[in-house]
Amino acid sequence: MSPIETIFCSQYYELKKGGRDAAKGRLNATILTSVLLMMLLAGFLIILTYFVPHNPIAAFLKSATRAVGYSRWSGKLLGVGCAAILGLIVWLTFGSKTNYERMAVGWDQLPDAVLQKTIRKSLYIFFILFGFFLATTLLLLI
């Protein structure tokens, strides 16, 4: 099971286990996946701009920040826009309705022990990516 499928499966299983509509797990997993991808992308961009300060990506980010204005909202606007684009990509590709239903049929056939492991594995994925993001943001403070 891929990391993204693990996240989708854990959201599906949590809702199904609680007696709620498991189809809502698609939206929850899409949002969670886009946030995790945002943290991963931001971490790599921070590393890239820290170790290679004069690269085209850093120049683009500086020009995009100037275009929005150097306010406290500029980073939030760029972040929300990027998260929306990533969320749309995940929603239309991996989290499409037909793909989610196909995966749900497979998950229904798995034993509960395997499904419990997917919840733990998705938490590991979250904490590893969150730790990576925090570690890279500490580079900004150095």
Image (cartoon, helix red, strand yellow):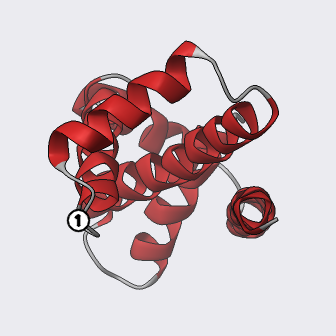
Farthest residue toward the bottom?
18
Work out whether 56 lies above or below 104: above
Percent position (x, y) of residue 35? 46, 55
Question: Depth check: 27 or 127 in front?
Answer: 127
Residue toward you, 135 or 9: 135
Q: Is residue 108 left or right of residue 48?
A: left
User: Which residue lies at the image location 35% right of the left edge and 60% below the top edge?
Assistant: 25
Is residue 90 among the parts visible in the rendering? yes
Mark 1 sits on what residue?
73
Quadrant of res 118: bottom right
Q: What residue do we see at 76% from left, 25% from top?
A: 52
In the rendered image, residue 71, in percent from the top left (x then y), is placed at 24, 65
Q: Secondary structure at mark 1?
A: loop
Query: Seen from this angle, which residue lies furthest top?
Result: 56
Give, as a three-letter code, the residue at label 1.
Trp
The image shows residue 64, relative to residue 65, as above or below, that is: above
Q: Is residue 21 left or right of residue 101?
A: left
- Give the residue at x 30% y 43%: 65
Question: Residue 113, image x and y in percent?
Answer: 79, 67
Give the image quarter of residue 133.
Answer: bottom right
Residue 31 location (% of width, % of height): 35, 56
Figure check: 113 above or below 23: below
